[in-house]
Image (cartoon, helix red, strand yellow):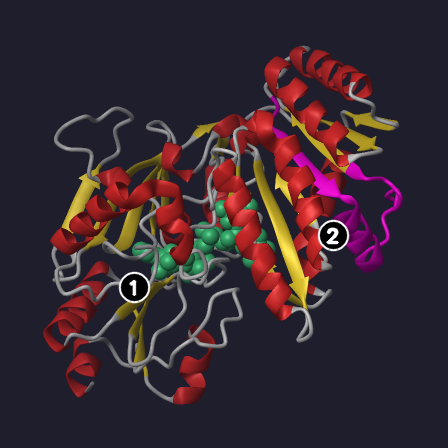
Amino acid sequence: MRELAELLLDGRLLTAPESIEAYRRDFVPDPSAGMPCAVALCASAADVQASLRWATRHRVPVVTRGAGTGLSGGATAVDGCLVVSTAGMTDIRVDPDARVATCGAGALNASVKAAAARHGLFYPPDPGSFEISTIGGNIATNAGGLCCVKYGVTAAYVLGIEVVLADGTLLELGGRTVKNVAGLPLLPLFVGSEGTLGVITRAHLRLLPAPPPASTVVAVFPTMSRAGEAVVAIGRTVVTSMLELLDNRTINNVEDMRPSGLDRDAAALLLAQTDAAGSGRLEDAATIGRLCRDSGATELYSTDDLAEGDLFVDIRRSTGPAVERRGSLLPEDVGVPVDRLPQLLARIEEIAAELGVEIPVVAHAGDGNAHPTIVYDSDSEDRARVAFDRILRTAVDLGGTITGEHGVGRAKRPALESQIGSGALRISRLIKAALDPEGILNPGVLL
Ligand SMILES: Cc1cc2nc3c(=O)[nH]c(=O)nc-3n(C[C@H](O)[C@H](O)[C@H](O)COP(=O)(O)OP(=O)(O)OC[C@H]3O[C@@H](n4cnc5c(N)ncnc54)[C@H](O)[C@@H]3O)c2cc1C
């Protein structure tokens, strides 16, 4: 430990248990989280290299951490590990003519968005945590968000990264060019690798010209399946820049926390936005409204006012804190082909009824990506875990995925093989062994 302390600048190595405590878990309150031996607050790629060389030399497991907002236990510490924090690497530079932002792994997503906006540019990926999560964490989980339905997930915006391997080797993958097909595509391997292949220290991110302000349509449905049908119909007809769904429990959770005049009796609420250019936006909003009515919407509201639209987006973003007040949580992140969303939603309702547990659902509905959150207390914990497994199984049975955007982490690792199969798992482990032969990077996560 003295050796490592000498490699890092003063104060960059935390060893006191009280300062380490905050680095043991991400947003998943895992009671089995271990106690790190130390936390390295890295300020540069050189700090990360020194930390990893030390960890390799002494066979110390390494848990890489951005902001710790992960929802799958990917940054949960194991006993005796070194936590490598990249949160301090926050520099951002925007090259507006190349439409590229270059930033340290610890830059917050919101800071990159703001830096791009100062040049009239737009960094689209917008996880619900965009104000508090880091670009390094976003890349390592291939984060999605609300606008992916039109703009795609983080992977679509990562042009290049700098990454440190377990033995301290620094790799530059990709660069600042929009196109780049030289060599095997190694860069995508690291996008979504959840800290198991290397530590990302820097990224070159693709920016777009800022889109025009969006029009907003809100529709209320008497059943979840009708809302699901509307999602399918809208997806076939209009390119929405947001298509989110809140179920009845979520609506009531939000109303309990911040009364907003939502219909507490509604089975489902759809929130759609379109940011098409010119008059296309108004036409698209009218089409979305018509398709919602055709699918049985009982109430419809449409606005071109940006501030009013933002109020609804704010309501959507408050669904996380609103459900946190209900009790202990098991967050899910399943995805299905969009046409099967109604079946997924119906099955989740059945599972909640069968097991007598509360499962509010919000969904990035346009992507077929649902976040059922299982609420439990000490009496219902066992049933909650059964519900968790049944929902994962349902997604796989419907041809979907156990995780659309949060990652496998520790929470869903036992279910990975049921989705990707033993062949893909074996190849993944071979790749991991080639890059991290001692297996020190995030043991127990993902693979
Ligand atoms: C309220 C709320 C809303 C959310 N909404 C969304 C959403 O809409 N969409 C979505 O996709 N996610 C969402 N999330 C989940 C979470 O914010 C994302 O997974 C985010 O990308 C994690 O970033 P982080 O900096 O907090 O990473 P952490 O939680 O610190 O780490 C996440 C994983 O990435 C690894 N990692 C972190 N930094 C690095 C690095 N520099 N190099 C290599 N590996 C690294 C860690 O080891 C871990 O496996 C939400 C979370 C919250 C709390």
| Residue type beneath disc 2 | Ala
Indicate left or right for 25 with 102 as reference.
right
Foreground residue among 304 and 152: 152
Instruction: Give the label, 2 or 1, closer to the camera.
Output: 2
Residue denoted by label 1: 442
Q: Earlier in the sequence, mark 2 or mark 1?
A: 2
Determine the residue positioned at 62% across, 62% down: 384
Q: Position of residue 36 (x, y in %)?
A: 34, 79
Q: Is residue 66 magenta?
A: no
In the rendering, which numbered label is found on residue 312? none
**Where is the C terminus found, in terms of image quarters?**
bottom left
| Above or below, 10 relative to 87 | below
Per the image, label 1 sits on a secondary structure element best described as loop
Contact, mark 2 vs mark 1 (Cβ under 8 Å): no
In the rendering, which numbered label is found on residue 353? 2
**Where is the N terminus found, in terms of image quarters?**
bottom left
Q: Position of residue 432 (x, y in %)?
A: 20, 53
Determine the residue positioned at 46% across, 38% down: 116
Indicate left or right for 130 with 248 as reference.
left
The magenta span reads: 240-268
Per the image, label 2 sits on a secondary structure element best described as helix
Indicate left or right for 38 with 432 as reference.
right
Q: Residues within 10 Å of mark 1 (few under 14, many from 20)?
A: many
